[in-house]
Image (cartoon, grey):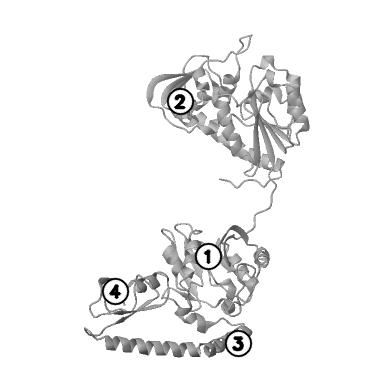
Amino acid sequence: MDTAVAHLAGALGKPVWLLTPFAPDWRWLLERADSPWYPTMRLFRQRAPRDWGGVVGDVRAELARLCADRAAAPQRAAREAERRRSVVARRETDRARWSDERQLDPAWERRAALAADHVAAGSKVLDLGCGAMTLERHLPFGCTYLPVDLVARDERTRVCDFNRDGLPSADGATVVVALGVLEYVYDVGAFLAGIRAFGLPVVLSYCCADLGPQVDRAALGWVNHLTRRGLAEALAAADLHVRAESRIDEMQVLLRLAPRAPRAERSPRVVVLTFNNVGNFGDRLGYHLVNEILPAHATVTHAHFRPWDVPDEPFDLLVLGAGNSLFAPLLTDRLGALLARAPAAVGVFGTQYRAELDARRLGGILDRLAAWYARSEEDLLLYAGARGNAVHLGDWLVSAFPMARGRDERVLNVGDEIWQDLPLDRTIQRIQAHRQVRSARLHPLLGALASAERVAYVEQRETPTRAPSGKFRSMLIDVFGRTYPEDEFFAVDRDAVARYKRQVQSAMGGMRAALASLVGAPPASPR
């Protein structure tokens, strides 16, 4: 009756029969023999008020049928086992079993929910062996569901016997799901090869023979018995790579597979030696840009001239500079010794205060480089000589500055405050907000060229001789083909700036390929 015993049994998931009066409590609803609250409960209802005799008769008849079924169960089980052995002997799929919806275990829904966590929103999902189609209920937003099974589960189902027909076409799918299917496939290799042929990501489950409690796999209808190692070998033979693995329960694993195994590549070790441990705006921009042109799998160590913190560990490539300047105090014996032990080295730098540079010492450094990506044409003309390793890169930091249009009419004066550790994006936006910019630093001026109408520069004179740095002149000749007087505003030729940006970015593309070649990495795909 409707007592605590009935509710306890239902909550425990135990089979329980409940006798209800003609006018029942509201929770038992009307005209149904089951309960939405307790899936294992069966309701026996009065057909008329006070008619308990009819209810007891119904219970008696059902109990007799249940006892008869229990008595005949061993014989039925034996016949079913013999039927399944015959199906397996003929290497056929058990159509009779899978045509019976009672064979679709509700517990499999948890597996479907876990599999859906591996599916991206908006996917077109090919569900091989869809069963009760519980996967569809758990797919993320915007997914299209393409069910496939041995028998039609609804009007959308494509009927396919994987043991006889192979696999269906992908039908535009973007991901393939196969849950609880592989255990019933006779030719595992052919099935996995068929999945590989889709060229799509795959979410697959399998009950490995060496996981969890030992069960009678044949009695469950499973026709193959792969261990974890056997499954891994079968996937490798099909060129399917495991991207992610998790456990569904004690026996089942859930795998996210990629259609091809990635090349096993050793991560090249790269040391980038710069002056960027100070707050210089250009040096900090260079830190980010140098990471853009290195191979994606490289392990990078950023080291500095002052204080010298180059690690003693071996490395594969030295990158000297990040678009900044190499000047006399940095051309030390310590730098020469580092280049001597570098398996490969490239330079990404310009020069400044050239009258004080030791050209012979700089030449010795350039001779040790596989390539020198010079910041300006003047750098090449002064120091490259007949060397074939020198390339005119241009000032690659121009890539950090979008072509924009300033609106603020006030003159922006950029001085040493740019050394403050300010956010780079906000600094660029502040520079490019103005239509007129005067700068005493090189790279803020370069950023202003992409946005301002008029600019002026104030030369840096940071040596005892008070000589100009020369780098403003080099940059202006590269961009405009001429220089301009110091501290006088001039109109910006936007077409020339855009043309310069294109040239620099084109050179950077070749630079990426060259660096990848130096460390034995495949070149990156074009963006």
Q: Residue at x 45, y 78 (%)?
A: 152
Task: Indicate which disc, 4 or 1, sits on the residue closer to the N terminus.
Answer: 4
345 with respect to 163 (left or right): right
Distance CA(mark 2)–CA(mark 4) = 73 Å
| Residue 428 in sight in this render | yes
Neighbour tally class for label 4: few under 14, some 14-19, many 20 plus, Cα within 10 Å: some
Label 1 vs label 3, nearer the camera: 3
User: Which is nearer the N-term, disc 2 or disc 1?
Assistant: 1
- Do callouts 4 and 1 mark residues in contact (Cβ within 8 Å)? no
Mark 1 lies on residue: 176
Q: Nearer the viewer, mark 2 or mark 4?
A: 4
Q: Residues within 10 Å of mark 1 (few under 14, many from 20)?
A: many
Q: Nearer the viewer, mark 4 or mark 1?
A: 4
Mark 2 nearby-residue class (10 Å; few <14, some 14–19, many ≥20): many
The residue wearing badge 4 is 28
**Residue lying at 40% horizontally and 90% vertically, measured from the top left:** 64
Q: Position of residue 116 (x, y in %)?
A: 48, 61
Calculate the distance from the C-alpha at mark 2 to the C-alpha at mark 1.
50 Å
Amino acid identity at mark 1? Val
Q: CA separation, marks 3 and 4? A: 45 Å
Figure quadrant of residue 79: bottom right
Q: Residue at x 57, y 34 (%)?
A: 288
Q: Nearer the viewer, residue 330 or 84?
A: 84
Q: Residue 431's mark?
A: 2
